[in-house]
Amino acid sequence: MNTSPSLAPTQIRLRGYPAGAVTDDTWLMSHDPLPALQPGEIRVRIKHLSVDPGMRGWITPKRSYIAPVQPGEAMRAFGVGEVLETASKYFQVGDHVTGFTGVQTEAVLDGRQLRKVDLSFAPARNYLTSVGMTAFTAYFGLLDVGKPQAGQTVVVSAAAGAVGTVVCQIAKIQGCKVIGIAGGAEKCSYLRDELGVDSAIDYKHESVAQALKVAAPEGVDIYFDNVGGDILDAVLMQINRHARIVVCGAISQYTDIEHARGPANYLQIIAQSATMQGFTMRDYLTRIPEAFMSLMTWQSTGKLKVREHVLHGIDSFPKAFQMLFNGENLGKLVIDL
Ligand SMILES: NC(=O)c1ccc[n+]([C@@H]2O[C@H](COP(=O)([O-])OP(=O)(O)OC[C@H]3O[C@@H](n4cnc5c(N)ncnc54)[C@H](OP(=O)(O)O)[C@@H]3O)[C@@H](O)[C@H]2O)c1
């Protein structure tokens, strides 16, 4: 075991909990040396970072599914990296691992919190993208919570994003009619022309309620909700009996997350005997191998495409974070370090 601490790694730390929108001032860059390894720990060089809307919830001191990041701590992030040094019997130098690595170039991490990844199945970055957390979220959210059946109509919001693109394609694989909602003509063309959805609604330039009446006169059986807010309310007015609302995320509410508002039209849940169910990926951790196999199979047979939006360098993190909220990412947003 090599116990020499490494020189000058870079960390991006949370300066303090933001009120409202996250800005560059939310973060603090440091170059603190790493401590020596304790038993069970590994030193990891982080190669790829995932940038996710859910991070907004992690920097809010409000009850959630995971404890908030503390001011001064390195920002939490999923990453993939290579083991440089080990005091864990489960990891060898040269292994690749994924899990919460944090927004940092190198880190000493508890080996029990990380999962080994096999680069003979997929390149390192894919463990954050095509076979990463967002793809697994799409898989379990649609199939387990949404329970699609062939011929049913599925509506997906933030449809051109990391989770949404995978949901749209899995719904097509299940034989459903798919309507994607996204911001802008480019994203809508991508959904129609590249991913084969039946219709795409540009919520920035048309009324979702009106466009949905045209695209789905038969009504909506499953709504996979990534955004909440007005779009959720518009879709609720057009759900069918026994519809399933899959509450995956609510990005429209994250900027003022302390005052997130629920759906005004929730009485439709009663009127249509519908269900509205939230979930997080932690409900499905033991079933990751199943999702991994299905996603790999669909990708290798050309049924599923995953688009990556790659930025470079740890200092691109503040900008990357804001891109999610401005709709500037085209696919799964990651940073190569
Ligand atoms: N439950 C879970 O376990 C879980 C796991 C992962 C992600 N999620 C949730 O899933 C959702 C999508 O995450 P992702 O990683 O796939 O992100 P993403 O869709 O790749 O990126 C976020 C997208 O949201 C859209 N957006 C931003 N502000 C919006 C607003 N005010 N109204 C409508 N759309 C808005 C933007 O696309 P447009 O250009 O189309 O506006 C943006 O590109 C998020 O809500 C996230 O929190 C949940």
Image (tube, rainbow, N blue to C red):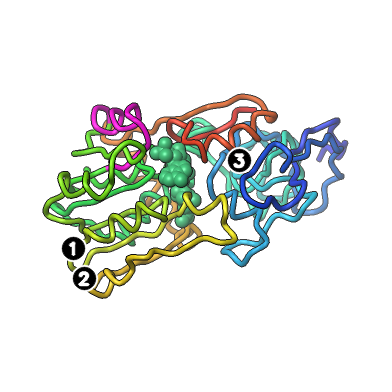
Q: Which residues are magenta?
A: 180-194
Q: Position of residue 229 (x, y in %)?
A: 41, 55
Q: Is residue 236 above or below residue 189?
A: below
Give whichever of discs 1 and 2 has the lower sequence position.
1
Helix, strand or loop: magenta stretch: helix
State the SS at label 3: strand
Q: Name the residue located 28 percent from the left edge and 55 percent from the top edge.
A: 235
User: Residue at image x 25%, y 60%?
Assistant: 237
Please give the name of the residue rendered at 88% of the width and 36% of the height, measured from the top-left corner: 4
Q: Ligand 1 within 8 A of label 1's CB?
A: no
Q: Is residue 107 magenta?
A: no
Q: Is 186 one of the magenta-colored residues?
A: yes
Q: CA distance from mark 1 to mark 2?
A: 6 Å
What is the x, y in percent for residue 140? 37, 55
Kind of residue at disc 2: Gln
Instruction: Say which residue label 1 marks.
Output: 240
Residue 317, image quadrant: top right
Visible residue check, residue 134 = no
Name which of mark 3 and mark 2 comes first in the sequence: 3
The residue type indicated by label 1 comes to: Asn
**Residue on which disc 2 sits:** 272
Q: How many marks?
A: 3
Comparing marks 3 and 1, which lies closer to the viewer?
A: 1
Mark 3 and mark 1: Cα distance apart in space: 40 Å
Looking at the rendered structure, the secondary structure element under dot 2 is loop
Mark 3 is surrounded, within 10 Å at the Cα level, by few (under 14), some (14 to 19) or many (20 or more) other residues, namely: many
| Of callouts 3 and 1, the N-terminal one | 3
Q: Look at the image and tell me in which quarter the C terminus lies.
A: top right
Q: Residues within 10 Å of mark 2 (few under 14, many from 20)?
A: some
Disc 3: which residue: 79
Q: Residue at x 54, y 52 (%)?
A: 254
Is 54 displayed left or right of 86 in the figure?
left
